[in-house]
Amino acid sequence: MRTTLAYGVREYQTRARPGGGPRIGEDTHVTNDRTDEQTAADAPGGDRPRGVVAAAEAGLPSAVAAAEHARSHLADVVRTPEVTRRLALLWDPPAPATRGRKPRLTLDDVVRAGIAVAQEGGLDALSMRRVATELGVGAMSLYTYVPGRTELVDLMIDRAYAELDLPAAGDPWRAALAQYAHEMWRLYLRHPWILQTNMWRAPLAPHVLDAQEAGLRTVVDTGLSEIQVVETLGLVDNYVQGLARATIAESAEQDATGMGSDEYWTTLGSFWEDWFDVERYPTMTRIYVAGGFDAPQGPFDASLDRLLDAVEMAIDRAGATP
């Protein structure tokens, strides 16, 4: 979102200057970008202008406010051809050719093949050559559809996020946030390769932002401040991602060794009699004697409920604040 708003600031400031000409050092060689000129008629859906600036100029109040906020908080940002191409592939992919010989592949074919490779061997196995092998074509032919591995991963993530069954607007916050968390949990278990990416730099892709929008929407009208809303969703995201990573790692370990978690710890049972120091670790000893470590690892639902209890207390405190 910060990147998107910064982009809007640059356009807003450029257009507001007398003459509207480029600044010194400003990139003037970006191609295939019609954000400023695009009208409502040719925007996605046919009735909405694309981008904060175009929407602000069309009189959409929230877009005007967003452009003003960006202008006052963010520095000037230069768009590069690489970034422009990367975002255009996500938001305005080229339509299939309708003239001449029918292409052997489509962009969807390439994305599906990329996901298949990542499902089998993780992102470390993903390369343009490996995807080409999966499709039975030469590696160079893939560049007709996608510029490189970075853009392919963006498209793969967006395709995976399209599988999410997101909570609807207006659903009670607790049920909606629980649904969001469960959907993200199941997504990571279906596509563990997603967690091999930097989740703090998730692609600015349509379905990725749809998920973020739905998650934020679950608690935006609960009385929490906007900052607390972002913090709350971040807490849920980090919890789900961390538990999913641990679950995926444990599953991989079991597959590799043929040994379950209980069996593994049983093999190390001599440690407690031969090496554990009760005076060095008095808190652990106290909890051990009380049976605190006897319960199995809590299931996802139980631990999520505890997290949602904490969110509910924060909402109650916000409602009680004058």
Image (spheres, rainbow, N blue to C red):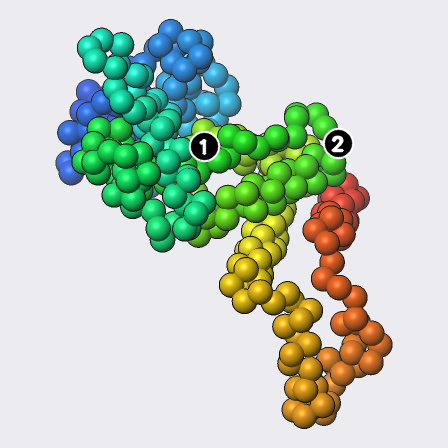
Amino acid of disc 1? Arg
Of the 4 image quadrants, the one containing the N terminus is top left
Pointer 1: residues within 10 angstroms few (<14), some, or many (20+)? some
Of the 4 image quadrants, the one containing the C terminus is top right
Q: Residue at x 65, y 30 (%)?
A: 167
Q: Is residue 300 left or right of residue 160?
A: right
Vertical comparison of 99 with 319: above or below: above
Q: Which mark is residue 159?
A: 1
Q: Is residue 34 left or right of residue 109?
A: left
x and y, in percent, of residue 35 in the image: 31, 21
Residue extending furthest right?
A: 290
Q: Is residue 122 left or right of residue 176?
A: left
Amino acid of disc 2? Pro
Q: Is residue 302 left or right of residue 41?
A: right
x and y, in percent, of residue 262 in the image: 69, 69
Observer able to see residue 26: no
Pointer 2: residues within 10 angstroms few (<14), some, or many (20+)? few
